[in-house]
Amino acid sequence: MNLSITKKQSSVPWERPLGQETKQRPLGHSRLNKVERMGSGYKRIREYLGAAGLPFPEIESGSFFIVTFKRPAVVSSGTKEETKEKTKEETKEKTLGKILAAIKANPAVTTLELMKLLSLSDSGVEWNLRKLKSAGLLKRVGSTKGGHWEVVSR
């Protein structure tokens, strides 16, 4: 066997001449155990995906090994815009409900207290109070500073 190489050998495996310096290592007990488990991957993937009701993945090999798992389609009840609008409306209704509950608990509650309780700005609290008044659900009795709120029941 002639190993005379004129240039310095590279330590990077893919730059070394193939087959000249590689040696077959005997399989030890620990490596043998790993080799036996290597072939069970496809079987386990098939079992796990089958249990989840998913199809077997697409497997491509060439220069690279690519496995593509398919996810189930997500069923949406509407578009993003519809969902945003629905969420806004639900949030507004919850806020109005919280204001009415706070006023029932303390009819003399101030806008400052409502701001802290609801984490809203001053204009946000005023907007919600105007909305409740225009809907006929809320009424101010007395003066601005000395009065109180009344929840109108329908």
Image: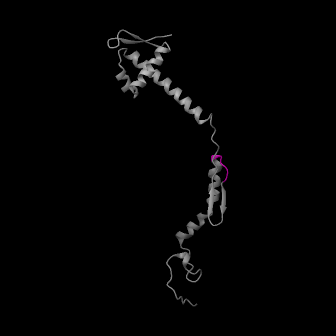
Residue, x 46% and y 14% (percent of image)? 133
Asked if one can make out residue 40 in the rendered structure from this viewpoint, the answer is: no
Indicate the position of residue 92 as horizontal and vertical percent values: 49, 25
- Image quarter where the N terminus lies is bottom right
In this rendering, is residue 9 above or below 136? below
View extreme (left): residue: 146
View extreme (top): residue: 142
In this rendering, is residue 40 above or below 2? above
View extreme (front): residue: 123
Q: Is residue 101 magenta?
A: no
Which picture quadrant has residue 148? top left
Looking at the picture, tell me which residue is in the foreground, 21 or 41.
Answer: 21
Residue, x 47% and y 17% (percent of image)? 132
Asked if one can make out residue 7 in the rendered structure from this viewpoint, the answer is: yes
Q: Which residues are magenta?
A: 52-56
Indicate the position of residue 124 as horizontal and vertical percent values: 43, 25
Which picture quadrant has residue 36? bottom right
Q: What's the image's color scheme?
A: one colour
Horizontally, residue 48 falls left or right of residue 102, namely right
Indicate the position of residue 89 as horizontal and vertical percent values: 53, 26
Question: Mainly helix, strand or loop, the magenta region?
Answer: loop
Residue, x 35% and y 22% (percent of image)? 113
Looking at the picture, tell me which residue is in the foreground, 23 or 3.
Answer: 3
